[in-house]
Amino acid sequence: MFRASDYSNLLRQLEQFFTDSANQKPIAKRLEPEILREQLSLDLPTEGKPVEQLQTDIANYLTYAVKTAHPQYFNQLWGGFSSPCFMGDILTSATNTSMYTYEVAPVATLIEKTLIAKMGKLVGFSEPEGQFTTGGSNGNFMAMAIARHRAIPTLKQEGMVNSPKLIAFVSADAHYSFAKAAHLLGLGANQLWKVPVDEQGRMVVAELEKQIAQAYAQGAKPFFVAGTAGTTVQGAYDPFAEIATVAQREGLWFHVDGAWGASVLLSPTHRYLMQGVEQADSVVWDAHKMMGMTLMCSVLLLKHRGMMLSAFSADGTDYLFHAGEEEPIDLGLSSIHCGRRVDAVKLWLTWKQLGDHGWETLIDQYFTLAAQAEAIINAHESLAMVNPRQSLNLCFQYIPRNSQQDPNTLTLKIRQVLWEEGVAMVNYAQLDNRVVFRLVICNNQTSQSDIKEFFESLVAIGQRLEQEIG
Ligand SMILES: Cc1ncc(COP(=O)(O)O)c(C=O)c1O
């Protein structure tokens, strides 16, 4: 059934793919969808073919795949490559199982519980509980659902028909998944109130207090506030201790969205950014971002035991969950999913390989690279940071020498050329009326010389375009 030799061709193709990434071959082959469609044989056949003949399809896939382990890949909040993680992915596929019961996933259940305990302790929870989820968005959704359940326990059976108007608060720079959660949970997106942020994108807690008072004055029921640990664009960390004080006083569930930035907890030097997180009721932490795991690998951690089970258990599950133990080991009982992939094994293997100290070194290395990038930007006459760096995100612009030229247009154009010429991938964002590069440092294949090269390429393209535009 399984012969290792059947996979030797695939492994050779993968080796070539990663060698090309390491040798900085073009990072992507950008084609319009209609043209790419012509290059691939996408149609699904009526008659199948032997597995050996899938090689061309695999080769095509790899030819047009973006090289996310390329040292110049800075486009998203994830990238790079980890061997133990890759081994874990293979192990997960090979032993294909679902996380719902201990019966079918005995080792994976214990591994997941070990990681939840470890990561929960790093947050500062004494008796943590949690689940791996299908990502930070899903974790934020689940946290809001649990908070809603605590606010109105009858709602699980009765729905929201007779419930007061519930109001949730997030910062103006919080991730869009909260807006989705608010409408999916029946609050309505208008009941997600956006608290203003300061220049650097941190929630202004005095504004939160004003908004809470306003909500009460309207007869509504504030129930949830989320702080963000590492905002998506600026990498800002909200003042958690201050938010916690307000949340406790007002009886709000306090959630921290650490999808991007909770991993700084692994570094004794940088974990100060998370000060106050231990006072949260729940925390989302994506290991597929700063920790470099393959997508998806994300946890929702809770301070209070039993809340997940209470919020997510359902009737009619006896066919699946047979035992009647006091603290059921089956993770599926307190999950919103039925079948769920094993995402914990790859993280567990990587943790075994790196140890706590390896994680610390990785996170500290990212901060060193980010500081180097910031120094390059600050020292260069054609580059300007939009705000000082707070963590691993650098928002900056290319400033043309000719003041008649528009930095926004030029910034977009430079990004496009870097990508089309296969040199580097870096994303952009809009801050107020400025279009900025958003350089994110979280790729374990990137070195100091790669950072230097990135800026050299960017500036060279900028100068070329300036001349072309005239
Ligand atoms: C701050 C923040 N929260 C949540 C998310 C969503 O995470 P995921 O992509 O794992 O759903 C992101 C994604 O970038 C994010 O930046």
Image: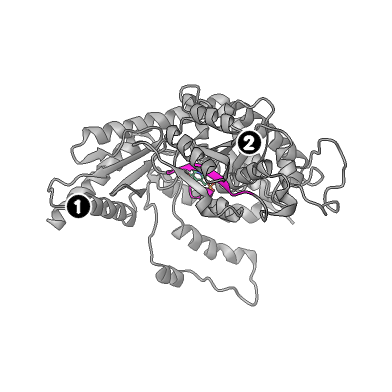
**Point 45% across, 47% down: residue:** 19
Rendering coords of residue 131 (x, y %): 67, 41
Q: Is residue 140 visible?
A: yes
Amino acid type for the residue under numbered disc 1: Asp
Q: Rounded to the nearest whole Å, what is the CA distance between mark 1 and mark 2? A: 45 Å
Quarter of the picture holding the N terminus: bottom right
Name the residue nearer the viewer: 184 or 224: 224
Q: Is residue 385 above or below residue 126?
A: below
Left or right position of 314 against 261: right
**Which callout, 1 or 2, points at the residue further toward the start of the chain?**
2
Q: Secondary structure at mark 2?
A: strand
Secondary structure beneath label 1: loop
The verdict on residue 176 being magenta is yes
Nearest the camera: 250 or 3? 250
**Magenta residues (range):** 164-178
Magenta stretch holds residue 141: no
Q: Is residue 342 shown left or right of residue 462?
A: right
Q: Residues within 10 Å of mark 1 (few under 14, many from 20)?
A: few
Q: Which residue is mark 2?
A: 301
Label placed on residue 445: none
Residue 297, given in percent of the width and then of the height, sits at 59, 43
Residue 417 appears at what percent x and percent y? 28, 55
151 or 331: which is nearer to us?
A: 151
Residue at image mark 1: 406
How many numbered marks, from 0 up? 2
Q: In the rendered structure, which amino acid carries the disc numbered 2?
A: Leu
> Which residue appears at 85% of the width and 54% of the height?
319
Cβ atoms under marks 1 and 2 closer than 8 Å: no
